[in-house]
Image: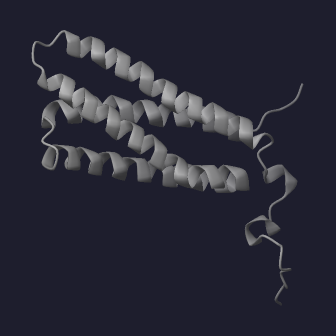
Amino acid sequence: MRTQLSAGSDPAREGASPSDQISDASRVLTRLVVAVFGSQVVVAALSAGGVALVPSHTWWRGLLAASIIAVAGAISAFLPLVPCILSGMNAAVYGYLAASALRMLVMLGGCLASVMLFRAPSLPTLLLVTPMFFAQLIAEAVVMSGALWPRKST
């Protein structure tokens, strides 16, 4: 038995129930952007404090490379996540997983490119990009769990 789709229907939303939709997707997206980029600012500031204690200028070059890589990873993670959040809760879960995988690939590729092509110092770049990666992952997980976790009204 086949069902006919009208010209303006969206196959992804055909089976979606109203309870599957995220109630305020624009608010979730705003919180997500603020949390991810806010975590980057905090981690970069704390890293700069630690780098200031090291008497070598190569750590500053590593911090700059790690910051650029982290911003690229954050932007790339929003590419699969935004349309999935707008599609509903089930799609948002898959979008979160895709965003995590894409962020890892972009940040790892960015580290390799910065070291091999742009001659950034390898140890500082890799050490400083790691807390930025985890800060993004934690901020995204906190916001997404708040949006997807079922709440009981009292």
Decide if residue 92 is in sight here. Answer: no
**On-image quarter of the N terminus:** bottom right
**On-image quarter of the C terminus:** top right
- Place of residue 59 in the rendered image (x, y in percent of width and height, measured from the top left): 17, 24
Q: Residue at x 55, y 36 (%)?
A: 141
Q: Is residue 118 above or below residue 16?
A: above
> Residue 41's quadrant in the figure?
top left
> Residue 67's quadrant in the figure?
top left
Residue lying furthest bottom in this view? 1
Camera-side residue of 46 and 65 = 65
- Place of residue 70 in the rendered image (x, y in percent of width and height, measured from the top left): 37, 37
Camera-side residue of 80 and 14 = 80
> Residue 73's quadrant in the figure?
top left
Q: Residue at x 9, y 18 (%)?
A: 56
Residue lying furthest front in this view? 118
Left or right: where 27 falls relative to 40: right
Left or right: where 141 falls relative to 88: left
